[in-house]
Image (tube, coloured by chain):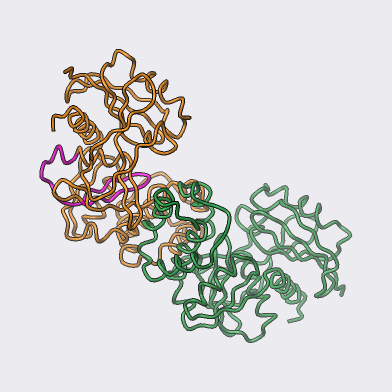
Chain colours: A green, B orange
């Protein structure tokens, strides 16, 4: 059996592909044609554009491409279950495109698409790992993993809230460049210890800037929101082994805030984890594992 | 001295004027030319457009017209102080336009512009009243009033958050027409008792709609946010006499939620209160009080 295949991470706002031979990436490409920009009949062409036919073998895809508004709906698998349960969904068309299912949870209701592949990749790179994974982003996921299964998870809209408040609310007038870890941590501490103050403390960012020219509004906004998220997800991280997936400034902020709570977290690179997860899915599809 | 004057409520998104004779409105008009749409040199013409020169006498104005980005900045008065402290700010130009100062608080930092006039109007209509006023809106104000003075106040960005989340976030896909008081109250109860759950419970609105078609997302979003606001402002309303200013559905929601907490609140009409406050400012300017 040929070892050639195509790895595909297809989210709401971007599309990323790798030409693979076994676990080795031979080439890669990306485009801005995310799921959110495409009608169902446009997916095949958007894929061919970045991953030409010379990139032979099946395409293993994860992410919002499998949402109801995507190419074809890949049904959710209900937790508790392995991050890569059986059953890929074949997209319509000549090219063999196989989409990884998302995960769902009934109580409290929650869903993920794409992050399950990162969870699988992290476990492939860290066999036997038990603990909690934090995947920061527009919708940050907290995932409790035990014995190779996703036991439960929770989503916080922190990233989307930060984007809306910093660019579209009255707080946008107080946002400046620059960052202060100290201001971030002080703000995170406020909402971690007094989460009920979030809605009133947000406006104080604007009032403080008006009255005294108080700075660091960006770091303090991020701190108030991430502190509130950590208050919401305390049962996930308290006393657990925690790994934050991502190497960017946002992931570092989570590590900094957790560390200040006496909950040291490790960091893992997001790209490597995604590719390891897609590779695990490909091996599983081939029947190797 | 003539009893003719012009009452003017000039907010961010609208402008409303009344031709007055003493405490009696002879005529009224409004336009969408709020402070947010105008450069400083456009205010005079925007006012003349709705309040023609035949509307004689001084113009007494409240609201964002006196903000730094408005016609002319009317400095804040620091609480504790009466809602209408001495000193109106005269706008540049031939017409006599006098702007009421906003109020500020240093710790926690907070500001208001326009609501102080409603507070004064409520007190003019209810002499000797002590308690807490709730003024729902884009930025809801909670105002502690005692012995005719504003003692302290707090702003919650609940209205702006609702607008952003219901029209610009992923939750917009789950918003429907219709309203359920029961769903609103159940959601308010969640964040009132567990305010730390706000950021994660918001995403559950979307996940619930995806997984089970759960409805009432609009009422539940409003409930989660207003419940969190009531948790943030509990020191204001707990065990206090509370009046909610406004007669619309939003004001009713606050009354309903407070009532469920054993904190019965009365309601006052917003328009009448604003006009009574502007009238009190005019009397004070004339030296009558």
Q: Quadrant of residue B282?
A: top left
Number of numbered discs visible in the structure rendering: 0
Q: Residue at x 76, y 51 (%)?
A: A46
A188 or B264, which lies in front? A188
Magenta-drawn stretch contains A229 = no
Residue A115 lies, with reference to residue B103, above or below; the image says below
Q: Look at the image and give the residue range highlighted in magenta.
A: B122-144
Instruction: Return the x and y of residue B84 as percentages of the image width and height.
Output: 23, 39
Q: Residue at x 43, y 57 (%)?
A: B214
Q: Residue at x 78, y 62 (%)?
A: A96
Instruction: Return the x and y of residue B154 as percentages of the image width and height.
Output: 31, 53
Farthest right residue? A54
Report whether A1 appears left or right of B2. right
Report whether B262 appears left or right of A286. left
Q: Residue at x 46, y 80 (%)?
A: A238
Farthest left residue? B128
Q: Quadrant of residue B192?
A: bottom left
Q: Quadrant of residue B277?
A: top left
Magenta-drawn stretch contains B143 = yes
Quadrant of the snapshot with the N terminus of chain A: bottom right
């Amino acid at each position: 059996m040929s070892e050639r295949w195509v790895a595909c991470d297809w989210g709401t706002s971007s599309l990323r592909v790798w030409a693979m031979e076994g676990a080795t990436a031979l080439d890669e490409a990306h485009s801005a044609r995310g799921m959110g920009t495409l009608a169902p009949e446009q997916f095949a062409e958007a894929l061919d554009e970045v991953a030409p036919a010379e990139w032979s073998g099946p395409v293993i895809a994860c992410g919002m491409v499998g949402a109801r508004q995507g190419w074809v709906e890949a049904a959710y698998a209900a937790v508790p279950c392995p991050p890569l349960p059986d059953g890929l969904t074949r997209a319509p068309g000549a090219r063999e495109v196989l989409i990884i299912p998302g995960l769902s949870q009934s109580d409290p209701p929650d869903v993920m698409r794409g992050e399950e592949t990162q969870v699988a990749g992290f476990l492939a790179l860290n066999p036997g790992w038990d603990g909690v994974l934090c995947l920061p982003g527009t919708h940050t996921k907290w995932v409790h993993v035990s014995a190779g299964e996703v036991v439960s998870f929770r989503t916080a809209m922190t990233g989307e809230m930060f984007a809306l408040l910093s660019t579209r609310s009255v707080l946008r007038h107080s946002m400046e460049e620059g960052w202060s870890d100290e201001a971030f941590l002080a703000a995170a501490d406020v909402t971690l210890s007094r989460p009920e103050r979030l809605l009133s403390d947000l406006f104080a960012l604007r009032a403080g800037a008006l009255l005294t020219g108080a700075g660091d509004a960006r770091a303090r906004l991020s701190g108030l929101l991430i502190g509130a998220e950590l208050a919401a997800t305390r049962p996930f991280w308290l006393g657990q082994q925690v790994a934050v997936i991502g190497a960017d400034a946002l992931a570092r902020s989570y590590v900094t805030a957790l560390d200040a709570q006496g909950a040291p977290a490790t960091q893992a690179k997001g790209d490597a984890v995604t590719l390891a997860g897609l590779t695990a899915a490909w091996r599983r599809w081939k029947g190797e594992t």
